[in-house]
Image: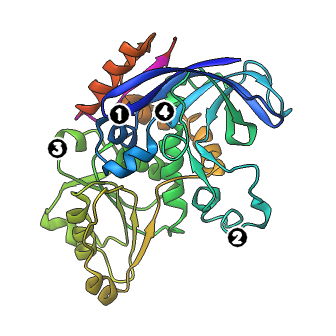
Amino acid sequence: MLSKGFKVVQPRRFEVYIEDLDFNEGRTLVKIDTAAICKADLRYYIGKRDARVLGLKYPMNLIHEAVGTVVKDKSGRFSVGDRVVLVPNYIPDTHNSSECKVCQNSYLGENYCPSALFASSNFNGFSRDYIVWPAKNLVKFDNSISFNHAVFAELTSVANAAYRRIDSREDDVIAVWGDGILGYILVAVLKQFHNGDIIVIGHNEEKLSKFEGVRTFLSDDPRIRDCSITVGFECIGGAPSEKGIEEIINVIQPGGRIVLTGVAEDYVKIDTRRVLEKGLSLYGITRSSVKDFEVAVQLLKKADFISDISKLVLEVDIIKNIIDYYETFEKESTNRKLGKFVMKFQF
């Protein structure tokens, strides 16, 4: 069977690729229905990475946030018509996960395995009409969840992975630095699991106003120091994450835990002296496991969680051809609102 897709071949240039699908045992044929663009996709599209790195990546199918419908299954796990979320991590069949200490570590999971591949990063992503994907990397969701909401399962899974790594306590005061989409979804997840105080620190008052049910502060507000923060999540990314990390280190309580989730292309400075003086622990979280996706799907069944997530759908774009695809990438590249332009693949 042939599949049609769009690959980025150089900055701001896509090309149409027609490829033959290799449908083996343990695989499932999925029709991609809905997808969303990540900041990492935009970096490849715009060319905001080292030229040498980009040269190794191009040509590549972008998109790692996608959901679709099962067309055919050779694993025995799914039926035709099942709705599924695609889990973007990919462990080659040649890798023996049962003997891999990283894969068997429940705190880490297969994403941190040195052999792991990740869609739209070091492996082709989901910007195509049909894809053959390992059945073990698909998570079913029922018809009560719309495709437009299910496409946020990937970010929800990352937020869940970040939260579960810290072994939070009820008396923890958790603060999230970053008023963007990851910070927003993390707060939505925290509200489902954490009964203690939740605080959000950001730079944009309009975005902060959309964080409901939690306390919000603008960065550098002196009142942040009085909040007795014990856990700090950095959800800023890029060069600005340096200032955010500095503020977390300065205001967090001794013995606190800091979780870094934002990706920066260049090195950022961290005041290790203050980290040592305060006995802080630093965690790095950027991806998630199949189990995190399963949690995400369960959360997407909850009305209050959907109420939060639905606000992130800025617009639904129908993608019938490569021109439509270009237009959505261009809109997303200049988007400064809290949310995404969701894409419906109909090409």
Span of residues in magenta: 336-344
Q: Residues within 10 Å of mark 2 (few under 14, many from 20)?
A: few
Give the percent coordinates (x, y) of residue 37. 40, 33
Q: Say whether marks 3 and 1 touch (CB < 8 Å).
A: no
Q: CA distance from mark 4 to mark 3?
A: 23 Å
Q: Which structural element holds mark 4?
A: helix
Residue that label 1 marks: 10
Q: Amino acid at mark 4?
A: Ile
Dot 1 falls on a residue whose secondary structure is strand
Task: Find residue 101 and name its label.
Answer: 2
Q: Secondary structure at mark 2?
A: loop
The residue shown at (43%, 62%) is: 196
- Mark 2 vs mark 4: which is more N-terminal? 2
* Label 3 to label 2: alpha-carbon separation: 44 Å
Q: Which mark is residue 130?
A: none
Q: Quadrant of residue 55?
A: top left
Foreground disc of the pair 1, 2 = 1
Amino acid type for the residue under numbered disc 1: Gln
Q: Nearer the viewer, mark 4 or mark 1?
A: 1
Q: Which residue is mark 4?
A: 306
Instruction: Tell me if residue 216 comes above or below residue 27 in the rendering.
Output: below
From the image, tell me which residue sits under label 3: 205
